[in-house]
Amino acid sequence: MRTYIGRQQAISTEDFTELALGTPVELWLGVKGETDEERAAREDAARDILADDPKLPDNLVRIAAQAIEENPDLFDIVPMVRPARHRTARKGVAA
């Protein structure tokens, strides 16, 4: 099954998110090893985008809710079974 956002095909989850948001995910989450200057510039750009589109956070929540609704198995959690602890009886005489 192919997924398109507009005319662009989303091949990976990152593509889908970037196309749906209209911005790279790294803008919001950052990248490993970024400098303080890079982080400050990224945060300034994110603030400008939010100022230009105040509905963006609502759209993000809507996209997340839609993804959860369409893929409920993402949250199927199977509890891990802990092995039973076997206690051995101590043999001996109490002092």
Image (tube, rainbow, N blue to C red):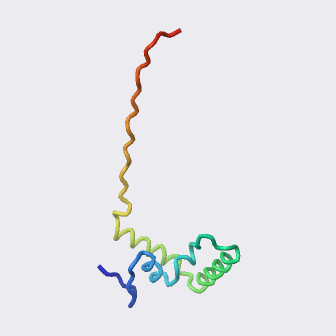
Front residue of 23 and 85:
85
User: Within the image, what quadrant is residue 45 found in?
Assistant: bottom right
- The picture places residue 93, in percent across and down from the top left corner, at 47, 9
Task: Please report the residue visible at 59 percent of the width from the left and 84 percent of the height from the top.
Answer: 49
Instruction: State the residue lying farthest toward the right.
Output: 37
Residue 64 location (% of width, % of height): 44, 71
Name the residue rendered at 38%, 60% in the picture: 75
**Which of 1 and 57 lies nearest the eye of the viewer?**
1
Q: Nearer the viewer, residue 25 or 66?
A: 25
Residue at 59 percent of width and 86 percent of height = 52
In-image side of 9 versus 43 (left or right): left
Residue situated furthest left in the rendering: 1
Q: Quadrant of residue 63?
A: bottom left
Percent coordinates x, y for residue 80 in the rendering = 38, 47
Q: Could you tell whether 67 is left or right of 1 in the image?
A: right
Quadrant of the rendered image containing residue 17: bottom left
Q: Quadrant of the N terminus?
A: bottom left
Number of callouts:
0
Q: In the rendering, at what x and y percent does residue 20 appear?
A: 45, 81
67 or 24, nearer to the observer: 24
Query: Is residue 3 left or right of 54 when viewed as pictured?
Result: left
In the displayed image of the protein, which residue is found farthest to the bottom?
Answer: 7
56 to the left or right of 64: right
* Residue appearing at x 44%, y 18% in the figure: 90
**85 in relation to 43, above or below:** above
